């Protein structure tokens, strides 16, 4: 992509918490900053990404160019990179995948989005698959309440992407889509566990009047956990139909969005007040 077009996407991504419009509306993107192999200067580009549990995958397609993109050459020289996902900015280690692992994960990407195979054919090269292994991102910057809202918006955005991906599925659910769902499940489980174990007790100590609201939020966590477990069970089946999966995701979405709205109403003002 031309540099000025890249910068427009970068600016829009940063201004809108990871959301962009135009040809990349609804796409899974992140901003990847590498260190120039020759210049030593930071170099930021928007790249498509794929969830893969505790790591994120990027593919050095360069739009089907016969040459590897500059960011790939940079991370081969220095695998320490910075990732922006719209909510967090964090340091990561870039690992170029090889052999069976690379082939398996590229095939999984192609199963969901055949355009990757088209890029590889057009390029005449084997497209590198790179895993970005994150360090601890830490809390979102700024007031705690605003950070909680941004994190919630990331879950809302992911649910919207998954619903769109399921709706566009063919007669069966692609393996990568299953991974997307399972990654969301894990992220929600970790987030709610941290709230139950740390944030809620701390807030209860400072604001005893929140007791009833926090009890409701804990009960809603239990409901969401049950729905997540039902979703995991469904995803374990080999022959899950997209319509059945979509119904489960919609059920989770309705419950979770109501929960997130109530939590923000109750907690964000107090968290921002300090």
Image (cartoon, rainbow, N blue to C red):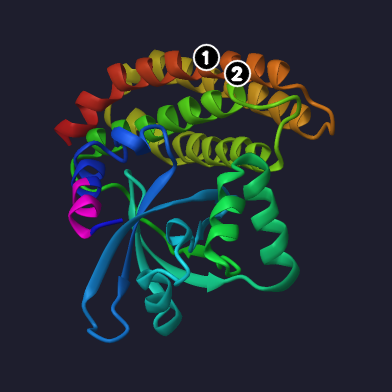
Dot 1: element: helix
Where is residue 193 shown, x and y percent of the image?
53, 38
Q: Is residue 110 left or right of residue 79?
A: right
Q: Which residue is drawn at 62% across and 49% down?
A: 109
Looking at the image, the residue that sits furthest to the left is 273
Where is the C terminus found, in terms of image quarters? top left
Which residue matches tag 2? 223
Give yes or no for contact between labels 1 and 2 (Cβ–Cβ under 8 Å): yes
Q: Which of 121 and 180 is in front in this view?
A: 121
How packed is label 2: few (under 14 Cα within 10 Å), some, or many (20 or more)?
some
Residue 123 forms part of the magenta stretch: no
Residue 129 visible, this angle: no
Q: Which residue is drawn at 61% across and 70% down?
A: 97
Q: What stretch is highlighted in magenta?
A: 3-8
Q: Main secondary structure of the magenta part?
A: helix
Which residue matches tag 1? 255
């Amino acid at each position: 992509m031309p540099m000025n077009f890249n910068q427009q996407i970068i600016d829009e991504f940063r201004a809108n918490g990871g959301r962009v419009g135009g040809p990349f509306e609804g796409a899974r993107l992140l901003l990847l900053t590498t260190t120039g192999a020759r210049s030593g200067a930071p170099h930021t580009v928007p790249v498509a990404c794929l969830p893969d549990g505790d790591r994120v995958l990027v593919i050095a397609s360069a739009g089907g160019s016969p040459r590897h993109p500059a960011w790939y050459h940079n991370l081969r020289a220095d695998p320490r990179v910075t990732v922006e996902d719209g909510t967090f900015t964090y340091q990561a280690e870039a690992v170029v995948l090889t052999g069976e692992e690379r082939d398996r994960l590229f095939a999984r990407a192609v199963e969901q989005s055949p355009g990757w195979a088209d890029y590889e054919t057009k390029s005449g090269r084997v497209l590198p698959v790179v895993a970005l292994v994150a360090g601890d991102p830490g809390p979102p910057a700024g007031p705690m309440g605003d950070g909680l809202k941004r994190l919630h918006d990331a879950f809302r955005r992911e649910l919207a992407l998954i619903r769109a991906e399921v709706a566009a599925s063919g007669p069966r659910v692609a393996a990568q889509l299953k991974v997307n769902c399972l990654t969301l499940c894990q992220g929600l489980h970790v987030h709610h566990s941290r709230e139950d174990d740390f944030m809620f007790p701390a807030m209860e100590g400072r604001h005893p009047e929140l007791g009833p609201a926090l009890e409701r939020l804990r009960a809603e966590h239990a409901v969401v956990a049950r729905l997540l477990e039902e979703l995991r069970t469904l995803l374990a089946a080999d022959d899950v139909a997209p319509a059945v999966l979509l119904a489960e995701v919609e059920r989770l979405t309705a419950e979770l969005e109501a929960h997130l709205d109530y939590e923000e109403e109750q907690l964000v003002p107090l968290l921002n007040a300090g």
